[in-house]
């Protein structure tokens, strides 16, 4: 039943991710920079940095927004895409757990 409760969040993330693929590219870039300097950080730290980069850069034409709950999805995607960094982000149980397993069975 929990999956049904949180499905709207999954749907929102999937729509956001499809419409804003550059956000994940930024997440990857910033995570890799951070990994080179820090033992661990939160995925939310990366999201906040993305907000800074977008707002202070040239991509904030119509008011950039990113849901803080999307950090869970981006963290899991990153660790699946870059298995050498699995475990880099501390994770809490999330609907993103089952979602990422459907993408990376």
Image (cartoon, grey):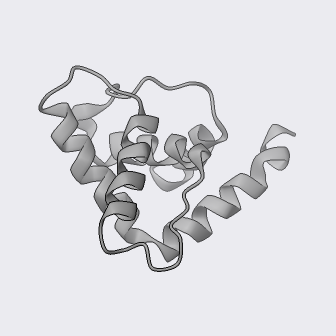
Quarter of the image containing the N terminus?
top right
Query: In the image, is residue 98 above or below residue 58?
Result: above
Is residue 35 found left or right of 95 in the rendered image? left
Query: x and y percent of residue 81 in the render?
Result: 31, 49
Q: Residue at x 85, y 45 (%)?
A: 5
Q: Please, which residue is most extreme toward the front here?
A: 56
Q: Residue at x 37, y 63 (%)?
A: 54
Query: x and y percent of residue 33 in the render?
Result: 16, 41
Is residue 86 found left or right of 99 in the rendered image? left
Q: Which residue is drawn at 12% across and 32% down?
A: 36
Q: Please, which residue is most extreme toward the left here?
A: 36
| Labels in figure, total | 0
Is residue 21 found left or right of 84 in the rendered image? right
Query: x and y percent of residue 82 in the render?
Result: 26, 43
Query: In the image, is residue 84 above or below residue 56?
Result: above
Query: In the image, is residue 38 above or below residue 26?
Result: above
Is residue 62 found left or right of 88 in the rendered image? right
Query: x and y percent of residue 48 in the render?
Result: 42, 44
Q: Residue at x 67, y 62 (%)?
A: 12
Q: Which of 85 and 33 is in front in this view?
A: 33
């Amino acid at each position: 039943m929990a999956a049904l409760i949180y499905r709207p969040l999954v749907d929102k993330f999937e729509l956001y991710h499809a419409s804003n693929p550059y956000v994940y590219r930024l997440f990857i870039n910033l995570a890799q920079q951070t990994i080179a300097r820090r033992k661990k950080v939160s995925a939310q730290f990366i999201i906040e940095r993305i907000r800074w980069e977008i707002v202070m850069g040239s991509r904030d034409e119509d008011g950039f927004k990113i849901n803080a709950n999307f950090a869970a999805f981006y963290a899991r995607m990153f660790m699946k895409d870059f298995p050498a960094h699995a475990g880099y982000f501390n994770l809490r149980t999330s609907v993103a757990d089952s979602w990422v397993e459907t993408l990376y069975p």
